[in-house]
Image (spheres, helix red, strand yellow):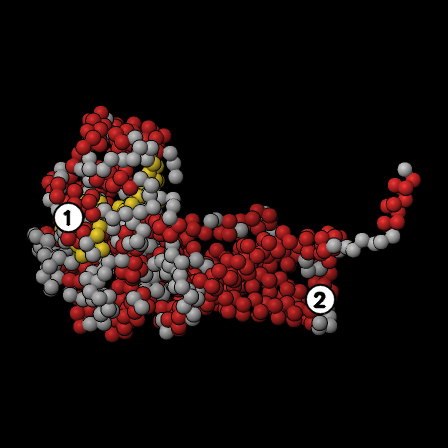
Amino acid sequence: MADIALAPRSAKTQIREATTWDQLKHNRNWLGFWFMLPAMAFLIFFLAYPLGLGIWLSFTDTRIGRIGQFIGTENYEWLWDDSIFWLSVFNTLLYTFIASAFKFAIGLYLALLLNENMPFKAILRAMVLIPFIVPTVLSALAFWWIFDSQFSIISWSLKHLGLITQNINFLGDTTWARICVIFANIWRGVPFVAITLLAGLQTVQPSLYEAATLDGATRWQMFRHITYPLLTPIIAVVMTFSVLFTFTDFQLIWAMTRGGPVNATHLMATLSYQRAIIAGQLGEGAAISSAMIPFLLAAIMISWFGLQRRKWQQGEAND
Amino acid sequence: MHDFTRRSLLQGGTALAATGALTGPALFDFAKAWAQTAPWKAESGAKLTVMRWKRFVPAEDDAFNAMVAAFKTATGTEMNVFSESFEDVQPKASVAANTGSGLDLAWGLHTLPQLFPTKVLKMNDVADYLGKKYGGWTDAAAKTCKHGDDWLGIPVATVGGYMTYRKSATDKAGFKEFPTDFPGFLAMCKALKANNTPAGFALGHATGDANGWLHWILWGHGAYTVDKDDKVIINSPETAKALDYCKALSDTFISGVASWNDSSNNKAFLAGDLYCTANGISIYIAAKDDPTKKDLAEDTYHALYPVGPIGKPTELQLAVPILAFNFTKYPNAAKAFIAFMLEKENFDKWLTGARGYLTHTLNAYDSAPVWTADPKNAVFAQASKRALPASGIGTPGEKAATAIADFIVVDMFANYCTGSKDAKSAMADAERQLKRIYR
């Protein structure tokens, strides 16, 4: 028995080399990696892979149901002097710029109003959210009827009031059609901006306003020098999202105009869908989608630097 | 996807109640007798998965399902039928062709079998059998399915679209007979406009309607997107003439056509705002089925598309061909089913169930009861004869289908008619887009 008991002790003096597996199991850095793995896998499979695949497809001549060949930048070369593509880029920028500006202005105005003390505050705040809650396709169909060339309620009412004699060609005229889809997008996007800015307003300390009042500040000065600077970070975030949502909008356009009349409302997203899915040219549709990436990156960068500036505004050191 | 037996039990009842003789013992007796003598004997234990496009009218679906049920009983073939919306049929068939599994038969649109000529079961024997028995195939139908001398599928039917108009309005405009040529048609549209009873044809992204009537105008002037070697020839004096004619025509239309989709003209016509348009038989059927629209239904008539300067009909009609994949384990059952569908005992009833939506592609069915059941259906019997394939004079296939789906011709006409572009740049744009597709 004693011999047996001694033998392992002598063996123990020799320290066993930690195998790679041991390291993977116990090293704290690796442990961190293990905990990160699920999130990473999620991001890779559902974000990075589709994005990478989309970019890869844009360099091939893939069609629906058929694997394509690598064709280099041919798709992009064809897009470069494709007037419909450039029209869609113009439309997208116009749509995004105008709709976002209006959404910001109206959203901020609504947020300031809702921040005041008034009766039925909670109900009013909930009501503002309604356009955001209604499924986009449903509201788009409603707008489609509202702006219909024959059955528009607006044309009907104006006709009965004797103000016009002919239906307004809402979705058949290029300018009108752009106004209509932008209007619908603003209607849908305002609640998101308004409610988020309202949340931001609630974080502003009332004592700041009291102090300003004692100093004799006007309402405008209070907004300009207290509310606005403190709201900047929220504005940056909310407008980034708003711009991204607007830039990539698809449902509203597809349900209301399908990009018509004469492609005046075709956005990059709808043109990409028409070419890739409807017409079956996946490669080219992917190229149009990929062409959106630089614009989206630019939007994100702008807000990134907007956020940086906020620290400086608050009197902190730049880092 | 659903289990066919359960569905047929549920639906068999409604079909019986609605249309009487569609199902029932007579059909089963015929199916059994047919299975005994048919040139194709279904493999024992055969199982077919069939994808079809989603029906327009319930009665058509009922007739189709009754046929499937009879085939199942007579041959012992397990049938699994499911339908997909128009846009989804082609992608799903393409995926099946690509992966070599999932479907045995696909009933699709346009020139579907041409998209994968190496993946389909050759149907030469079925086409010969049916063609000989039923007076031959119409030219356009054969072109949509033939690749050289081989039949890649069987052109089951055509979904026809024709002039739909209010007789009272055209009479008042001084046209007792619907015009048969382009100048007459333009004169009538001008007169309709003067009477404040305007015509209207979609100039928006309406896949079926806008492509249909605009290709008719283009081809009618002898202009085509591509020639027989698939060389792009859209930029031509003929196209310029077609553009000018179309512009003159569109000046007489009801306002808003540039925003129209496929349902817009149906709505406007049924509301009594629109007096002449081109459409499938659906407008008339909807009016007929609505007791409050009795007067409108009585006043609604159909006419053939007028013939253009080139002197022969140039219509774009929607073909609906069926194909079997060559990886199916039961090729004989697939062929037997296709042949069985088009036998007189089935097809007459099926056409009746479709109420004029579907037009036969076999000449013998000119005498099918549906075309005389209502004299207003008769026009639609011509759809398979007066059509050109979707490619015009070019090769039927993928590229032609893409050009149509991408609204190249529609945008060209819309650009010119709405004044967004002059004829030269409208044509140059279309040429550029077509070259992109036909590169």
How crowded pointer 2 is (Cα within 10 Å; few <14, some 14-19, many 20+) is rated as some
Is residue B220 something that shows in the picture?
A: yes
Q: CA distance from mark 2 to mark 1?
A: 89 Å
Dot 1 amino acid type = Trp
Q: Residue at image x 25%, y 41%?
A: B335
Amino acid of disc 2 = Ala
- Residue under label 1, please give it: B137
Chain identifier of the residue bearing label 2 in the image: A
> Tag on residue A212?
2
Front: mark 2 or 1: 1
Name the residue furthest right: A2
Marker count (numbered): 2
Q: Chain for mark 1?
A: B
In what quadrant of the picture does the C terminus of chain B appear?
A: bottom left
Residue drawn at (15%, 62%) of the image: B220
The image quarter containing residue B6 is top left
Give the residue at x 38% y 52%: B98
